[in-house]
């Protein structure tokens, strides 16, 4: 495995070669969310719409690229050693030729990002439009998001102008980007943002007052965030992370509140059902499918059979 030697400034430069929206473009993107909600047009937005993503990526994209995939490689590592990874075998070379044919206007780094996504895994940003529909349905006054990620649920909450968002994340590299994001959001919304950059297991949830939990926790070691190294086996994840954290946050959820988890079916079956019983509602998450070149002109669909849900329980 080969790792990059970029400093922070160089990483930002790399990220801007991939996504470099002006601040005006980003704020206009956020205001589309607000306007859609205010004008009652939220449900006219298509499920796979990227509205709001530009705004989020303006603040957190450079750190998203720092995330290591299940093979222990970040995009910065991949791009720093592009000569090795872009020429690793004939399959990769064929894929690059296919990408060039399908997307002839893409420059080299954007071609490389597509190769990375296919071979090493893409890092998803939770769509704020999906979050907004959950908030609109249940009308919480305070939501707890104990694994914040890249900001999709926060941005959605702010765009609906609800009362308070409590966010927790152990990736301290996100603290400054989130502070900058919240500084702007405070000018656009009355939502109070209460953010904590620490291990979610160390929080005393009995001191927090929330009527919704809505989060999308990491799936074992599939992605490693920030500077943290984590090689725990699944059994240890189950016993020392998922079970105690889900139980703590459920116990302190207000009666009548809603507990919403976006998790793979494996976690739902092995962790959630034993803790909470079957979900009262399941909302399917729409996912992009990808195609890869196969033999001759045949195409192979990737990921279309995989389904992911937001599982929802109401606490009585």
Image: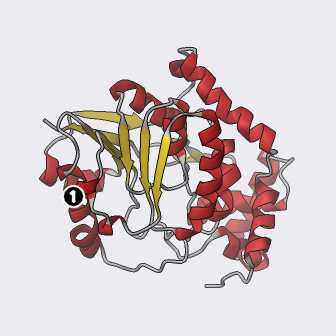
Q: Which residue is mark 1?
A: 248
Relative to 86, is 148 on the left or the right? Answer: left
Colouring style: secondary structure
Q: Secondary structure at mark 1?
A: helix
User: What residue lies at 80% left-to-right and 62% top-to-bottom?
Assistant: 109
| Camera-side residue of 117 and 64 | 64
| 39 relative to 29 in the view: left or right | left
- Mark count: 1
In the image, 157 versus 218, the foreground residue is 157
Left of 3 or right of it: where is 199?
left
Residue at image position (86%, 47%) is: 105
Indicate the position of residue 114 as horizontal and vertical percent values.
69, 57
- Quarter of the image with the N terminus is bottom right
Work out whether residue 292 can be spotted: no
Q: Position of residue 239 (x, y in %)?
A: 21, 70
Q: Is residue 36 above or below residue 148?
A: above
Q: Give left or right: position of 238 versus 194.
A: left
What quarter of the picture does the C terminus occupy?
top left
Mark 1 residue crowding within 10 angstroms, few (<14) / some (14–19) / many (20+): some
**Residue 76 location (% of width, % of height):** 69, 72
* Residue shown at 55% from the left, 41% from the top: 155
Q: Position of residue 147 (x, y in %)?
A: 41, 57
Q: Residue at 50%, 68% (x, y): give it.
A: 171
Q: Along the line of sight, which residue is nearer the eye, 164 or 223? A: 164
Q: Quadrant of residue 280?
A: top left
- Say if residue 316 shows up in the picture: yes
Location of residue 6 by image quarter: bottom right
Q: Nearer the viewer, residue 90 or 119?
A: 119
């Amino acid at each position: 495995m080969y790792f990059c030697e970029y400093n922070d400034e160089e990483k930002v430069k790399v990220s801007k070669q991939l996504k470099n929206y002006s601040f005006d473009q980003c704020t206009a993107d956020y205001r589309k969310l607000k306007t859609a909600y205010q004008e009652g047009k939220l449900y006219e937005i298509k499920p796979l719409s990227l509205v709001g993503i530009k705004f989020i990526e303006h603040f957190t994209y450079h750190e998203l690229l720092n995330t290591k995939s299940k093979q222990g490689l970040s995009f910065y590592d991949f791009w720093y050693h592009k000569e090795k990874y872009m020429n690793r075998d004939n399959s990769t070379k064929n894929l690059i030729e296919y990408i060039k044919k399908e997307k002839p206007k893409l420059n080299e780094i954007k071609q490389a990002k597509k190769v990375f996504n296919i071979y090493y895994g893409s890092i998803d940003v939770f769509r704020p439009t999906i979050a907004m529909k959950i908030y609109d349905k249940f009308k919480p006054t305070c939501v707890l998001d104990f694994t914040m990620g890249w900001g999709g649920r926060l941005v959605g909450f702010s765009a609906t102008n609800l009362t308070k968002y409590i966010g927790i994340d152990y990736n301290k590299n996100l603290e400054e980007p989130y502070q900058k994001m919240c500084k702007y959001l405070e000018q656009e919304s009355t939502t109070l943002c209460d953010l904590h950059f620490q291990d979610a297991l160390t929080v005393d949830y009995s001191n927090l007052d929330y009527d919704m939990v809505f989060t999308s926790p990491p799936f074992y070691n599939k992605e490693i965030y920030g500077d943290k190294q984590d090689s725990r086996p699944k059994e240890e994840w189950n016993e020392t992370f998922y079970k105690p954290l889900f139980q703590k946050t459920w116990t302190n959820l207000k009666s009548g509140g809603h507990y919403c988890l976006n998790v793979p079916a494996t976690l739902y079956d092995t962790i959630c059902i034993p803790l909470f019983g079957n979900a009262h509602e399941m909302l399917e998450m729409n996912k992009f499918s990808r195609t890869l070149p196969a033999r001759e002109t045949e195409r192979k669909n990737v990921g279309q059979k995989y389904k992911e849900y937001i599982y929802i329980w109401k606490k009585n």
